[in-house]
Amino acid sequence: MYIITVLLVVLATCYGAPHKSKEPVACGYDSCNLGQADKLNVHIVAHTHDDVGWLKTVDQYFYGARNNIQHAGVQYIIDSVIQSLVQNPDRRFIYVEMAFFWRWWNQQTDDMQATVKGLVNDGRLEFISGGWCMNDEAATHYNSIIDQHTLGFEFLKNRFGECARPKIGWQIDPFGHSRELASLFAQMGFDGLFFGRADYQDYEQRNKTKTMEMVWKASDNL
């Protein structure tokens, strides 16, 4: 049986304490600032959701063209995120869609690539899900889901190493969620899943009973 932890509202992701040294620190959970046990600790997750094609083409989204259709330019989003992380060591950011990050990465100088590697090694830039895109959960075939995540995982491993390995699934935009994907994510080694399109009645009930966090037990046959 494949089990994955699901958080519907607040993802208690790890935010490392500020690091002043030029030497890389432990990444992932080892860089987690757990907060203070005697206080309510709120983790605000800074992120961007970049559709790999929707109202505009992939190129138009990346370069910021046709803004009369939708005002979006992913290359400028990533540029500003990296600049902001460099300016303030207290800042953290997560990124999901490797189709855009791969393209952005290939256009950067050696110095910029080294800077980004440092942010990843320090746990300040974290990759979540790590697939080429945030896949739909209803119309997609499992082979395609596995292939597109494998493509993203290989890019992250080859460019950044173990510190870039995604540990959380991030499905904030698909129109509904499936046990099949929960099973696949568990088998991919994810420790948790954040999704946003729960049924409103389920959402209200879980909010009342304080059961927003749950363990999703997928079928043994999936």
Image: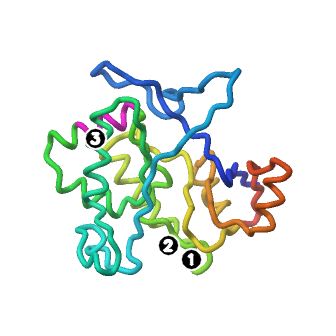
Is 53 placed above or below 206 here?
Answer: below
Instruction: Using the image, tell me which numbered label, if any, was put on residue 141.
Output: 1
Q: For label 3, count other residues whose C-alpha is less than 10 Å away and answer few (under 14), some (14-19) or many (20+).
A: many
Front residue of 99 and 176: 176
Q: Secondary structure at mark 1?
A: loop
Please tell me whether mark 2 or mark 3 is closer to you in this view.
3
Which quadrant is home to the C terminus? bottom right
Q: Amino acid at mark 3?
A: Val
Q: For label 2, count other residues whose C-alpha is less than 10 Å away and answer few (under 14), some (14-19) or many (20+).
A: few
Please tell me whether mark 3 or mark 1 is closer to you in this view.
3
Q: Answer with the quarter of the image where residue 171 lies.
A: bottom right
Q: Secondary structure at mark 3?
A: helix
Instruction: Using the image, tell me which numbered label, if any, was put on residue 45.
Output: none
Q: Is residue 139 left or right of residue 209?
A: left
Instruction: Using the image, tell me which numbered label, if any, was put on residue 144.
Output: 2
Residue drawn at x 51%, y 65% is 146
Residue 118 sits inside the magenta stretch: yes
Q: Secondary structure at mark 2?
A: helix
Q: Answer with the quarter of the image where residue 25 lies.
A: top left
Which quadrant is home to the N terminus? bottom right
Q: For label 1, count other residues whose C-alpha is less than 10 Å away and answer few (under 14), some (14-19) or many (20+).
A: few
Residue 210 sits inside the magenta stretch: no
Q: Quote the CA–CA distance across marks 2 and 3.
A: 29 Å
| Residue beneath disc 3 | 116
**Residue 122, percent from left and from top:** 38, 30
Q: Which residues are magenta?
A: 115-122
Q: Amino acid at mark 1?
A: His
Residue drawn at x 54%, y 26% is 33
